[in-house]
Amino acid sequence: QVQLVESGGGLVQPGGSLRLSCVGSGSIFSIRAKGWYRQAPGKQRELVAAVTSTGSTNYADSVKGRFTISGDSAKNTVYLQMNSLKPEDTAVYYCNVKDTYGYDYWGQGTQVTVSS
């Protein structure tokens, strides 16, 4: 059984930084991409950043230059380094893994609140 567990969320002031971690357990036969999504109250879940199995990265325009996705395969962990945080970054952040069959695996989410 595959499990994704996020951590690292919290309350931070505007301009601050946080690093989210997502640790995976279980086995996924063939991974297409790993990424982070977020969902703010009253809004749809949106892609924040993703990295494919070939190493290509994709970022939402709103976070380009501020957020960086990375991974440690040996630790089955994906990170999201978030710098220069803004109040509009406030959301629940979800870890996601997509396999080559199009199936999505999700974590339980971690709350990020940017406020003074």
Image (cartoon, rainbow, N blue to C red):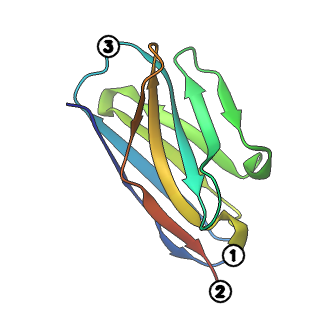
Q: Residue at x 43, y 24 (%)?
A: 103
In percent of width and height, residue 96 lies at 46, 38
Name of the residue lying farthest toward the right:
61
**Label located before the other in sequence (3 or 2):** 3
Closer to the camera: disc 3 or disc 2?
3
Q: Is residue 6 visible?
A: yes
Q: Indicate the amino acid at tag 1.
A: Pro
Q: Which residue is mark 1?
A: 14
Q: Which residue is mark 2?
A: 116
Q: Indicate the amino acid at tag 3.
A: Phe
The answer for how far apart the CA atoms under marks 2 and 1 are is 6 Å
**Label located before the other in sequence (2 or 1):** 1
**Label located before the other in sequence (3 or 1):** 1
- Rendered-image quadrant of the N terminus: top left
Q: Quadrant of residue 56?
A: top right
In percent of width and height, residue 20 lies at 47, 53
Crowd class of label 3 (few under 14; some 14 to 19; many from 20; radius 10 Å): few
Q: Is residue 86 visible?
A: no
Q: Which residue is mark 3?
A: 29
Badge 1 element: loop
In percent of width and height, residue 6 lies at 37, 51
- Asked if marks 2 and 1 touch (Cβ < 8 Å), the reply is yes
Q: Nearer the viewer, residue 62 or 108?
A: 108
